[in-house]
Image (tube, coloured by chain):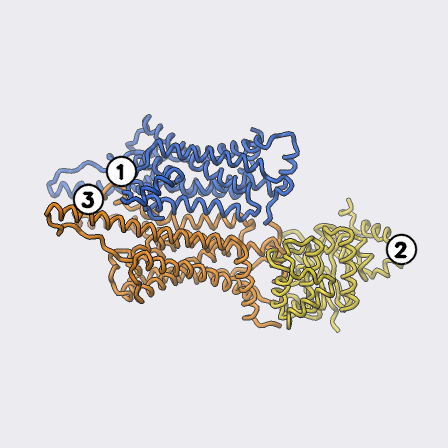
C-alpha cells in the first residue's frame, strides 16, 4: 500500500499536469499578466503626462519671471503605480481562482475517474488534500509570475531601482494575494462539488464573485450619505466638523451596517491591506512596514480566516461519489 | 478461505424507494458471476456498495473477508473496477492515466507493470495514445488495464459491453475469460444481455426490483433448461414487470 | 419567429438563466432600496441640521435632496446593468445556442427545409425578447420605487429619461448576449465558449477604460468616473481615438450616466452621438457575426468536445 503523502503528491502532480495542458489556465493567467502590465504602463504614462504638465507650467511661470513656489511638483512613489495592478489581482485573480476550482471538480465529475480514484485505497481527505495542494501550486506559480513581472516592469518603467524594503512590501502583498485567490479557488471547488448541475455551480460562483468583489464595496460606497450630494452633504450644507460628528451619532446603526457590508467583502480586506502595505493609501505612505501591518492586522486575519474556514468546510463535508460520477 | 464476495441481508433505501432489498449472496473465488436484471433493478447500487462507493442502509458485505464499510481501505486493495462507459482523463495518454492509478494504488515499479498489463490485454500500441482520441473499445481496454494494474482478487465490471460493436464485444469477452483463467481473478459482471452471460459466466444471479429472484451456476441452468433461448425465457418469467 | 419563441422558452426553462435573471432582479430591488435609503438618510441629516442652524441663528439652507435630479436615484442601475445585466445576457446568449448543440438537435434542424439565416434570426429574436422582458421587469420595480418616494412626481421628462436609459441598457446587454451566442456557436469546447466572452467582458469593463482614459478597474464601475479628466499627452489621445469606438462599456456608461443626470461628463471627450453609434454598430456587427457563425456551423459535429 502506498503512503498517504505519496498519494497526495500523485494527485497534486496530476492536477498540475492536467491544468497546464488545458488552455483555460494559460488564457486566464496570461490575461491577468496582461491586465497588470497594461495598468502599470498606463499609470506611468499618466504620471509622465502629469510631470510634463508640471514642467510646462514651471517653464511658463519662469519665462514670465514669476515665482514657482506655489507650484507643487507631482510626487513620485513607484509603489503607488501598483494601484491598478492590485485591483486587477482583486478582480481577475478571483476569477482565476474560481475557474481553477471549478475545473478541479469538473474534470472528475461526469467521468468515471472520481469513482475509480475512490475505489483505490485512498481516503477522501488525501484526495481533497492532493487537489488543494496541486491547485495552490498553480495559484502560487501564476501569481509569482504576475508579481515578478510587475516588479520588473516597475523597475524598467520608473527607472528607479526597487530597494529590498520595496521588494519586501511587494512580497507581503503577494502572500496576501495567495490567500485571497486561494479562497476563491476553494469557493469554486466547493460549489462545483456540491451543486447538482455544474453550470449552475459556475454561475453561482460568479454571482458570489460579483457580489463580494464588485457589488458589496459599491453598496457600502453608495450608502455613504456624503457620496449622495456632489461635494459631500455636510460641506454642501456648510456644517462644521464638530456638528457633523454630533449629527452622525444618531446614524451609528446605519454606519455600522454600511461598514459591515464592506467588511463582508474579502476583496475589500485584500485591497485595504495591499493599499496600506504599498503606501497607495496616503496615510500609510512612508510609514514603517511593521506599523502598517499592525494597523491593518484585522484585514490579514480576515483573509486568513476566510481561507482557513473554507478549507475546514471542504474537508468536513461529505462527498457523494455515486452522484458526482453521473453525467450532468 | 473467505469467499471472494459475501453479501448478507444488504438493503439500500432512497427515501421510500428500496433500491436493494435484503440481498444475500456469496460468490466463490475464481467465479465469473453474471448479475442480470432490468434497468433500475439495483445492479449498479450493488456494485457501488461492493466497491465501497456507497454506504448500505442495512446489512453487510465483504470482499475476501474485508468488510466494505468497516474495513473499506483493505477491501479496496482486493478490488478492481471498470464502471459503465468508463472515461479516464481525455487529455492524458493511456500510459499517463495508468501511471496515475498505479501510483495511487501503490504499485511497485509502475512503468514495468503498465507494460505487462498492456501486453496481457494485447494493446501495447495504445500506451502513447491520448484517451480522448480512442475508440470506445480502446477506452474499455485501458479501463480494464487500470482495474488490474494492482493485481486485484475481484474485478467488478458494470455493463462492460455497453456500446461496443460485435467484434469489440467478442474481444472483451475473450479478455474477461483470459483474466479469470490465467490470473485467477473473480469477476462480478453487471449486464442485461442474456447472451453475454451464457457465453462468459460460470454462474448467474437475477435481480428483480432489488430482490434476488434466481441464483445458479450456468452448468446448473443448462442442465435444467437447455440452451440460450430458455435462459431468456427463464429471465422473462423471473422479471415479469420488466418484460412488460 | 417560431424558433425565437422556442429559444425563449428554452431560456425560461433553463435554471441557470432564471437564476441570473433572479439575481439581477434582486439587485434591482437592492438598488431601489439603496437609492431610497440614501436619499432618506440625507433627508434625515437635513432634518437634524435644521435645529443646529436655527440655534446658531444662521439662515437654513435648502434641502440638498430637492436639488438631486430624480433620475439619479437609479444611479446604481448603471453599475448593475454593466455587471449582472451583461453577465446574465452573456449566459443567456450562450444557452440559446448551447442548449441546441448539447441536445444534439441541430442535425435534425439543419435537415429540415428551413434556412440557417432564419434560425440565426430566430436566436437573435429570442435574445431581444429575453433582454426586453428582464429590463421591463426592472423598469417596473424602478417606477414603483419612485412612486413610493414622497414628493416625487413622475412627469414626462422622468418617463422619457427612463425609457432612454432602458433603451441604452438593452443595447448594451444585447451586445453581450450576441457575443455569448457567437462564442457558443464557434467554439468546439464549451468551457472555452463560456470563458472567452467572459474574458472579453472583463477586458472591455476593466482594462480598455484604463488604456483610453486612465480609469482604474474599480473606478470603471462608478458612473461618476465619466467626470474624470483624461490625462494629457499623445498616448491617451491616440488610444481614445483608436479604441474609443470599440469601448462599448465606456459608451454605455457615458450615455446612461448622462441620461440619469449622474454626471456632467465634463472631463470626457465622448459625445452622445458617438457613443450611441458605437453601441448600435457593435450590435449590428455582432448580429452579423452570429449569422455567419451559425451558417458555418458543422452540422455533423455540432456537439461540444467537452
Q: Are marks 2 and 3 on the same chain?
A: no
Q: Which of marks 3 and 1 is in front?
A: 1
Local SS, label 1: loop
The residues tagged by marks 2 and 3 sit, at their Cα atoms, a distance apart of 101 Å
In this rendering, position of residue C15 left or right of residue A42: right
In this rendering, position of residue C105 left or right of residue B39: left
Chain of residue at mark 2: B
What is the display colour for chain C?
A: blue
Residue B219 visible from this viewpoint: yes
In depth, the one of C109 and B40 nearer the eye is C109
- Write down the residue under mark 2: B226
Residue C80 appears in which quarter of the rendering?
top left
**Residue B70, image x, y percentages:** 63, 68
In this rendering, position of residue C266 left or right of residue A322: left
Residue B191 appears in which quarter of the rendering?
bottom right
- The residue depicted at 39 percent of the width and 40 percent of the height is C247
- The residue depicted at 28 percent of the width and 32 percent of the height is C151
Q: Residue A235 carries which label?
A: 3
Chain of residue at mark 1: C
Instruction: Tell me which chain appears yellow.
Output: B
- Write down the residue under mark 1: C266
Mark 1 nearby-residue class (10 Å; few <14, some 14–19, many ≥20): few
Instruction: Tell me which chain appears orange.
Output: A
Q: CB of mark 2 within 8 Å of CB of mark 3?
A: no
Quadrant including the N terminus of chain A: bottom right
Amino acid at each position: 500500500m502506498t503512503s498517504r503523502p505519496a498519494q497526495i503528491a500523485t494527485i497534486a502532480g496530476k492536477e498540475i499536469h492536467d491544468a497546464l495542458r488545458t488552455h483555460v489556465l494559460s488564457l486566464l493567467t496570461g490575461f491577468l499578466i496582461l491586465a497588470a502590465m497594461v495598468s502599470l504602463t498606463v499609470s506611468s504614462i499618466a504620471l509622465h503626462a502629469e510631470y510634463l504638465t508640471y514642467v510646462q507650467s514651471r517653464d511658463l511661470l519662469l519665462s514670465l519671471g514669476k515665482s514657482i513656489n506655489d507650484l507643487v511638483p507631482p510626487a513620485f512613489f513607484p509603489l503607488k503605480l501598483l494601484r491598478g495592478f492590485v485591483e486587477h489581482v482583486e478582480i481577475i485573480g478571483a476569477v482565476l481562482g474560481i475557474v481553477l476550482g471549478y475545473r478541479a471538480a469538473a474534470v472528475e465529475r461526469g467521468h468515471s475517474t472520481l469513482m475509480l480514484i475512490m475505489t483505490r485505497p485512498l481516503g477522501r481527505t488525501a484526495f481533497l488534500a492532493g487537489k488543494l495542494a496541486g491547485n495552490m501550486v498553480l495559484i502560487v506559480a501564476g501569481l509569482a509570475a504576475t508579481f515578478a513581472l510587475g516588479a520588473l516592469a516597475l523597475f524598467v518603467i520608473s527607472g528607479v531601482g526597487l530597494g529590498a524594503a520595496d521588494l519586501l512590501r511587494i512580497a507581503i502583498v503577494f502572500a496576501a494575494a495567495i490567500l485571497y485567490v486561494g479562497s476563491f479557488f476553494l469557493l469554486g471547488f466547493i460549489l462545483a462539488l456540491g451543486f447538482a448541475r455544474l453550470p449552475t455551480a459556475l454561475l453561482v460562483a460568479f454571482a458570489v464573485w460579483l457580489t463580494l468583489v464588485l457589488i458589496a464595496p459599491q453598496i457600502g460606497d453608495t450608502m455613504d450619505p456624503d457620496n449622495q450630494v456632489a461635494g459631500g452633504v455636510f460641506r454642501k450644507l456648510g456644517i462644521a466638523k464638530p456638528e457633523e460628528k454630533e449629527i452622525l451619532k444618531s446614524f451609528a446603526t446605519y454606519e455600522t451596517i454600511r461598514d459591515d457590508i464592506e467588511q463582508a467583502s474579502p476583496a475589500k480586506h485584500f485591497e485595504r491591506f495591499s493599499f496600506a502595505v504599498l503606501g497607495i493609501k496616503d496615510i500609510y505612505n512612508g510609514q514603517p512596514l511593521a506599523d502598517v501591518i499592525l494597523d491593518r492586522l484585522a484585514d490579514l486575519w480576515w483573509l486568513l480566516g476566510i481561507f482557513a474556514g473554507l478549507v475546514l468546510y471542504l474537508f468536513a463535508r461529505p462527498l457523494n461519489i455515486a452522484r458526482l460520477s453521473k453525467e450532468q | 478461505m473467505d469467499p471472494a464476495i459475501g453479501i448478507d441481508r444488504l438493503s439500500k433505501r432512497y427515501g421510500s424507494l428500496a433500491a436493494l432489498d435484503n440481498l444475500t449472496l456469496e460468490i466463490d473465488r475464481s467465479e465469473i458471476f453474471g448479475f442480470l436484471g432490468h434497468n433500475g433493478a439495483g445492479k449498479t447500487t450493488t456494485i457501488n456498495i461492493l466497491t465501497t462507493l456507497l454506504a448500505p442502509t442495512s446489512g453487510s458485505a465483504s470482499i475476501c473477508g474485508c468488510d466494505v464499510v468497516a474495513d473499506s481501505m483493505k477491501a479496496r486493495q482486493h478490488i478492481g473496477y471498470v464502471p459503465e462507459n468508463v472515461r479516464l482523463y481525455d487529455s492524458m495518454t493511456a500510459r499517463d492515466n495508468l501511471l496515475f492509478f498505479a501510483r495511487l494504488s501503490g504499485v511497485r515499479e509502475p512503468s514495468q507493470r503498465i507494460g505487462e498489463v498492456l501486453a496481457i490485454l494485447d494493446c501495447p500500441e495504445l500506451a502513447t495514445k491520448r484517451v480522448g482520441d480512442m475508440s470506445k473499445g480502446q477506452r474499455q481496454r485501458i479501463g480494464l488495464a487500470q482495474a488490474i494494474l494492482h493485481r486485484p482478487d475481484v474485478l467488478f465490471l458494470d455493463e462492460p459491453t455497453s456500446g461496443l460493436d460485435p467484434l469489440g464485444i467478442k474481444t472483451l469477452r475473450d479478455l474477461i475469460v483470459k483474466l479469470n483463467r490465467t490470473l485467477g481473478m473473480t469477476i462480478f459482471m453487471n449486464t442485461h444481455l442474456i447472451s453475454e452471460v451464457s457465453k462468459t459466466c460460470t454462474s448467474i444471479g437475477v435481480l428483480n426490483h432489488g430482490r434476488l429472484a434466481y441464483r445458479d451456476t450456468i452448468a446448473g441452468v443448462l442442465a435444467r433448461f437447455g440452451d440460450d433461448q430458455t435462459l431468456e425465457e427463464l429471465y422473462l418469467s423471473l422479471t415479469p414487470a420488466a418484460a412488460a | 419567429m417560431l424558433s425565437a419563441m422556442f429559444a425563449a422558452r428554452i431560456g425560461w426553462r433553463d435554471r441557470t438563466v432564471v437564476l441570473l435573471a433572479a439575481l439581477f432582479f434582486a439587485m434591482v430591488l437592492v438598488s431601489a432600496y439603496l437609492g431610497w435609503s440614501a436619499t432618506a438618510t440625507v433627508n434625515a441629516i437635513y432634518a437634524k441640521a435644521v435645529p443646529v442652524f436655527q440655534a446658531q441663528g444662521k439662515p437654513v439652507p435648502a434641502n440638498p435632496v430637492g436639488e438631486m435630479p430624480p433620475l439619479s436615484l437609479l444611479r446604481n442601475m448603471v453599475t448593475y446593468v454593466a455587471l449582472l445585466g451583461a453577465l446574465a445576457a452573456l449566459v443567456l446568449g450562450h444557452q440559446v445556442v448551447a442548449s441546441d448543440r448539447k441536445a444534439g438537435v441541430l442535425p435534425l434542424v439543419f435537415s429540415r427545409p428551413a434556412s440557417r439565416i432564419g434560425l440565426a434570426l430566430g436566436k437573435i429574436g429570442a435574445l431581444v425578447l429575453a433582454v426586453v422582458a428582464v429590463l421591463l421587469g426592472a423598469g417596473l420595480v424602478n417606477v414603483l420605487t419612485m412612486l413610493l418616494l414622497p414628493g416625487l412626481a413622475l412627469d414626462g421628462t422622468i418617463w422619457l429619461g427612463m425609457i432612454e436609459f432602458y433603451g441604452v441598457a438593452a443595447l448594451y446587454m444585447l451586445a453581450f448576449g450576441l457575443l455569448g451566442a457567437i462564442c457558443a456557436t464557434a467554439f468546439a469546447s464549451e468551457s472555452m465558449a463560456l470563458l472567452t466572452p467572459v474574458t472579453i467582458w472583463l477586458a472591455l469593463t476593466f482594462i480598455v477604460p484604463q488604456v483610453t482614459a486612465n480609469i482604474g478597474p474599480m473606478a470603471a464601475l462608478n458612473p461618476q468616473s465619466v467626470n474624470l479628466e483624461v490625462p494629457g499627452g499623445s498616448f491617451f489621445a491616440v488610444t481614445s481615438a483608436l479604441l474609443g469606438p470599440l469601448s462599448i462599456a465606456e459608451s454605455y456608461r457615458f450615455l446612461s450616466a448622462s441620461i440619469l443626470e449622474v454626471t456632467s461628463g465634463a472631463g470626457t471627450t465622448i459625445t452622445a452621438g458617438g457613443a450611441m453609434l458605437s453601441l448600435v454598430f457593435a450590435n449590428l456587427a455582432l448580429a452579423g457575426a452570429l449569422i455567419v457563425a451559425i451558417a458555418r456551423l458543422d452540422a455533423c459535429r455540432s456537439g461540444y468536445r467537452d
